[in-house]
Image: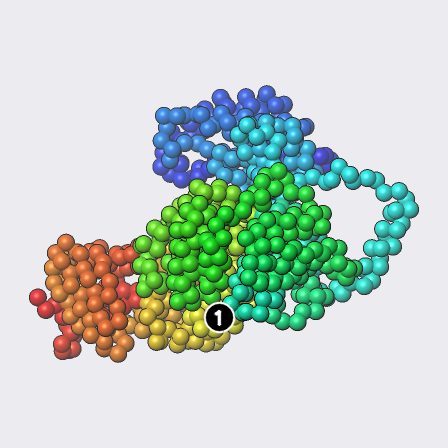
Amino acid sequence: MERRLTAILAADVVGYSSLMGKEEVGTLERLKICRRELFDPAVAEFRGRLIKLMGDGALVEFASVVDAVQCAVAIQRKMAEHDPAVPEARKIRFRIGVNLGDVIVEDDDLYGDGVNVAARLEGLAEPGGICISGTAFDHVVHKADVEFTSLGEKRLKNIVDPVRVYRVLLDSSAAGEVTGTSHRPSARTVILPAIGIAALLIAVATVAFQFDWRKPLAPQRTSVAILPFANLSGDPKEDYVSDGITEDLITDLAKLAGVDVIARDSVFPYKGKPVVLADAARELGVRYLVEGSVRRAGEQLRINAHLVDMTSGKNVWADRFDRRAADVFAIQDDLRRELVSALGIEPSATEAKRLSRAPTANLEAYDYFLRGEQAARNGERNALQQALAFYDKAEELDPSFAEAFALDARTTVNVWRANFNDIIQSAPARKRAYEKASLALKLDPDLSSPYAILGIMQVVDRRYEEAIASAERAVALSPGDAAAQIALGYVQLFAGNHAEAGAAVETALRLDPNLSAIDREIAGLVFLLKGDTSNAIETLERTRDDAPAVSEFRIVLAAAYARANRLPDARTALAGGLQLLSGSESFNERSLAAWRIGYAHFRNAEDLALIIDALHQAGLPEWPFGFTADEKDRVRGAVLAPLVLGHTLQGKLEPGGQPAILQIGQDGNAGFRSMTRMYTAKLYVDRDLLCEQSENMFGRPDCGPVYKRNGETGEDYTYVNSGTVFHFAAVN
């Protein structure tokens, strides 16, 4: 069996099945032209050997990884200009992956992980894009007229170890530049003399002897946790200052590719408590801990901080900063710079530029911003409303304050997703979030959080490729940001990319072992759809325990129990979730119909079907409040429209018989009123269903049947949809 180290280029056509389905002959002809005029000449120019064609894909071997990458770049640049007259939806676009690895050679074909990695990298590339492995990158970084963006380490399907992944940016104006993870070994690396190797082996043996193998293996990269800075001002109302400095430091360090920073949700439980540093380091899985304090007295500010290396227990850096409160940004800049230096991290030019930017020059605006952060953390209705007011004030005081607009967008998305319509109605909330996130990016294109927010909203709008690009951009800008990783996991999950979603949430859990409940629910869903029911249940049980009053978490847990054939547990969890809804105004979780609408942005129908089937097994009814009816009483076809359109429907709601009225114009414009609910909608008849479309349920139509009520008095009909059972009579 022959083995050799070689460069592999894997390519395939984006959306080939869809293209063939729309225009089989034309697609096949355009693909042949692309291969004949663009692909094959580029392979020949850079001395490649075509291993095989696979329908819409190709595998090519190169003796030089530089040739492989340059060939990929030449193909994609030419493809970008090819067929300008063809509509965008029908154009041929390639994804390309390049790897340098060991392969098995047999009968002129290649096998092994070296080939598999290239194929997996091709799947990570954007349409018209290129992804390469870290081994390829190390050889080509300064030898091609392109820029690179690090995507960090990725778990690739059926590949045991994580793979460093880089995206090739085809713009030659920044050739050789790199953003993201530290990409090569230091030039100062030297060969250890024999005595050094012996000493190293002794040290390793000592560590191995002392290491508790029952504990999780700590990350090999530089890892640090910033414990909450103590407020020594004597006034608890000043907590937002010390909390803000802590969070800013976490956020800034998370922008650096060379360090893993534990997220705020995992460190803030230590706030105000006596901390045993060794225990904290072990619980958080880090080598370094940062402790500090903030004392504000009038116009003076004193910040103390020190860095502890937990492998030795020694302080490796400490400093005190005494300045005017007005100099807070300069203090934070000095603190961050000294800490980064003490950790032995060398920021890239791009990272250094990013870190040097002060968030705002207006101290009053910054003060409101910190208060907004503190309020938004709570997640409750009133606190979110208060946070938005604080952000509004910060933005008014400094219209160039990008981070204020970014966190305003994040808070607005939380309002939108929670259906807190009394704060902002759904449609205006969605509009506000888009506008605020877009403005934040216009003010500072290097912020990661707006990209994460946009990714979530885009995937809900079923703009999958845009959503993936946005979420991956967020991760590239802040590879150590757990929120960005969770956003990527959410986007990849609904886009149908389970392996990529799993890799993202695993990274998020490493960066933030104490994820917020809503983020942990996303992780649980990812595990569930990957078929890892054990991990899904463990994750969702913790979500339930962390937020016992949230019905949705219990209902998703019921689905996980059902998938694991634990039906008694599934029914118990579901009953608990529905019990929490019994006195709630939320109508979005009571039925299978509601879950079909709320999760309709799954790209793959089978993913939604799996969840619906599991909830059905757990006992969730098709319609709210367990409503059923005899199909022989169904109002169908041409009878339905004249029954409701142009009429006022008056009746009662389930449960409890609350009075309600639904006024419908002949054009379908309608208004609904009860003692606790009021909304407007557009009503129309779709075959045998009465549908209403409003700004609720992400603007998706909510359709249901109408039944005649035989033997009943007062209300002649029943209309049921995902959240409503309405017994009514037409009064005019």
Residue type (three-letter) at the residue carrying disc 1: Ala
Q: How many numbered callouts? A: 1
Residue drawn at x 26%, y 57% is 694
In the displayed structure image, the side of residue 563 where residue 642 appears, left or right? left
In the rendered image, the vertical position of residue 485 relative to residue 614, given as above or below: above
Query: Farthest right residue?
Result: 195
In the displayed structure image, the side of residue 365 where residue 707 appears, left or right? left
Residue 256 location, x and y as percent?
A: 61, 47
Q: Quadrant of residue 646?
A: bottom left
Quick one: 21 or 581, which is closer to the camera?
A: 581
Residue 650 location, x and y as percent?
A: 15, 70
Quick one: 546 or 91, which is closer to the camera?
A: 546
Please indicate, yes or no, whether residue 453 appears anywhere in the rendered image. no
Instruction: Report helix, strand or loop for mark 1.
Output: loop
In the displayed structure image, the side of residue 633 where residue 59 appears, left or right? right
Residue drawn at x 58%, y 36% is 148
Quick one: 291 or 258, which is closer to the camera?
A: 291
Q: Name the residue beneath numbered marker 1.
A: 547
The quadrant of the picture occupied by the N terminus is top right
Residue drawn at x 42%, y 51% is 397
Quick one: 73 or 690, which is closer to the camera?
A: 73
